[in-house]
Amino acid sequence: MVVDSKTERRERGLRRIREEIDWYKTTLKELDKLTTDETKLWAPLMRAQLEQYEKTLRCVEERKPLLASYWSICPEVYRAMDIHYFNVQGHHFQQSQARFVIRELEECDKLGLARDNCSLLRLAMYYIASGLMPTPTMIIHKLEPCDALLGLHEAVRTHKEWRDIPHYSLDPPYWEDDRTLDYYAGEVNGVVSFLEEQTGKKLDVDRLREIIKESNKQYELWAEYNELRRAVPCPHGYDLSAQLYPMVQIFWTGDPRCTAWLRDMVGDAEERVRTKKGWLEREKVRVIWFDVYCIWLRDLNAWLEQEWAANIVMDMSSYCPYTLIDTSNEHTMFKGLGKRTLCDQIMVRQVRGSADRLLSDLQRMIKDHKADAVIPPTHIGHKDQIASLGLIREVCRDAGVACLDMGMVDIFDPRYTTIDEIKDRLSRYLITMGLG
Amino acid sequence: MDSKTKTKALQEFTEATGTILNPALRGWKEGGGKVVGYFCSYVPEEIITAAGFLPFRMRATGSTGTELADRYLSDCNCSFVRNCFNMVLSGEYDFLDGVVWCNSCDHVRRVHDNWKHKVKTPSFLHFLSLPKKTGEKQVRWYQEELALFKDSLASHFGMEITDECLWEAIRRHNQKRRLQRRLYKLRKGERPPVTGAETLAVMVAGTAMPLEQYGQLLSDLLSELARSEGNANYRARLMIVGGILDDPSYIKVIEDQGGLVVTDMLCFGSKIMWEDVDEGAKEPLETLARYSIKDRPGCPRFFGVHERRAAFIRDMIREFKVDGVIGERLMFCDGWAYEHYMLDKDFKEEGVPHLMLDREYLLGAVGQLRTRVQAFLESIGR
């Protein structure tokens, strides 16, 4: 893990991005040869991801401002100010990187960070420490949704290679009332002041309004799409539906291309619902994955579909009943952005404050999406969620739905509980519950 | 390793620390006094005292298992909350008249949810939203939170909590802190008259006894210790850094290997008394908020203050002539995982010998602990 010089470190940070770009280019080429409805829906997603990497590469190569940020902050503001960002948590969690994961987890173990900490965050720290992540020119943190993320931010902020990089952090309170939203709108305003100071650019409020209007359309379409997923049989598989979140909140926030893609998603789903054409030929089990997308879920999902005719009809990342933002003036926009990033976005919504929101979301998911089974994967990193397991089980019991407690699992470290063990547990559960 | 002074005061402190419903607390209840439990030191005891109640810091001392709590929490939750919630479910905290939380960590935060849903008593439960940044804006926010807490407490119990009551409570708690600091000061010398385990017993008792009684006992102890010749029979002077360690027997295991714990940065130690609450401020709630957010040594649940914590530890090392630092962490604590990761780098850069220990809340694996401490003492040439 020795990084000799700034140049070497810079090159190391870019190597993986170049590999990622190559992977996406090759995949897109293959995808373009196919012309099924499904591949048409996948292609824009691949393009968005490729574009993301190309922009990051360009920023580093041309020494342009590059923001390191996290999930659930304010992508609308970044876009309105034309500031490119990459996601520190997600950078090492991409397609082409999958083959490196085990080796890197082993290297990561040598860092000295406790192994009962979330591997996704440990890996981010490893990537920074080893120079595998590009060095940004500025950082924006958010101090929720978990203790580990705050710890990571502090470790990143004080790391010898990153400690001089200017940073700003948002402080999300526990509550969701009006006083909280006013406080948090101030935190979002702080993002703008910070970015203006770092880049010399001035936020154009009208441009922000346009971006928010476009993202409002995206959230409306996302909500519409989620409603279509209530249909039995469910029109799409989970792999595809899980992409709405990164498209809307990471890659193409407020970008009309994303809106067009969402329209296609809704259109395709609508057509399938109308013609009763489910994703699975004979859908037998409707599953709620009560957590976020994880590193081995693509594999597990394929197995669930093939072996059990089971479709993950909803998950925590996708189920965010977003509130649209009032664009009538600057105050309403910032308050709306605050609310969106505090009360609506992935994880921060469900696990930041009281467990009531987590439980009511689960109740609604089960009811609205006609679930047969709930799987909270009991990720070792999600301490707050696993401390709600008893309450989660009770919600499921009251709804008459079986809940599988998988025991201790690390959703980013396949060494912890192997995928075969997980499949075994799931098989026994589905058989026992009469869902096989 | 024990100090040579075996006083009645020390025995009473040890007794208060070794159980939940200690004799002093029982006496308070029998006299009609109310007790309000709180889960983290960022909940200001002063507000509870100003209401005329006894603040009690939640612990799981004497817990024998987690069978009841395991229905609600997971094996990956820290053993402090699992044992503590188990005691709540088994009725051992039925003496409480109220409980107060803040969002100190993910585990404790969820105890509030489980309590709210599954435990019917007491009827007064309150939650404080503690900011994670430490600026002036956050002081103002927390001041408002404290005002809501004060009003809610007063309204629930049908009373008024005046500014005068709050100032008086601040003065009394500062007096307690001053006495505690005098105890720590005695440990700076070559022959400390009190061990680390005994000091922790004194500190924990300070969160579980009526203030007057505690103050009198501590004054008595300080007088007796001043006359003691102290203890020079140790191999090394150690500092302990970590979170919610409330069990003196854990430190005793370390000290029995010859490492005298002369100071600490613990949630039941220096972190709660190294600074006073400013009595010269305009508003009592403002000064209490400022104390929590800015003035006292902050823990890793705050962002942006690692350097301040590291400087605090460095000062302690110098002042108390520390030979080595032991970091302790409850398994599954994410905040302290990153803090120890950062401290480890700091200590390496500065050449400070450092041993990192993960532990469970209830003392166990004593043989392993002994071995690691022995090896550590040998590694620093002691």
Image (cartoon, rainbow, N blue to C red):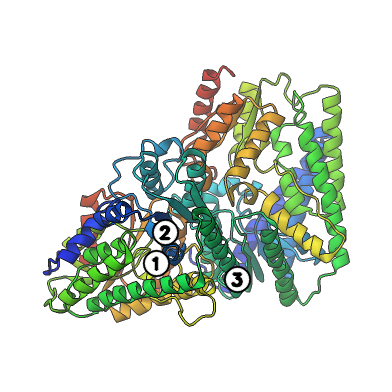
Say which element carries label 2. loop
- Compared across the picture, whether A200 is left or right of A305 comes to right
Comparing A88 with B109, the one in front is B109
- Residue at position x 19%, y 75% in the image: B192
Comparing A337 with B118, the one in front is B118
Q: Which mark is residue B140?
A: 3
Find out whether the residues at labels 2 and 1 contact each other: C-beta distance under 8 Å.
yes
Disc 2 chain ID: A
Residue wearing tag 1: B344
**Residue B153 coordinates in the image, percent (x, y):** 51, 57
Q: Which numbered disc flags the more N-terminal residue, 1 or 3?
A: 3
Above or below, A354 against A423 in this view is below
State the count of labels: 3
- Compared across the picture, whether B366 is left or right of A23 comes to left
Say which element carries label 3. helix
Disc 3 chain ID: B
**Residue B290 coordinates in the image, percent (x, y):** 52, 73
Residue wearing tag 2: A112
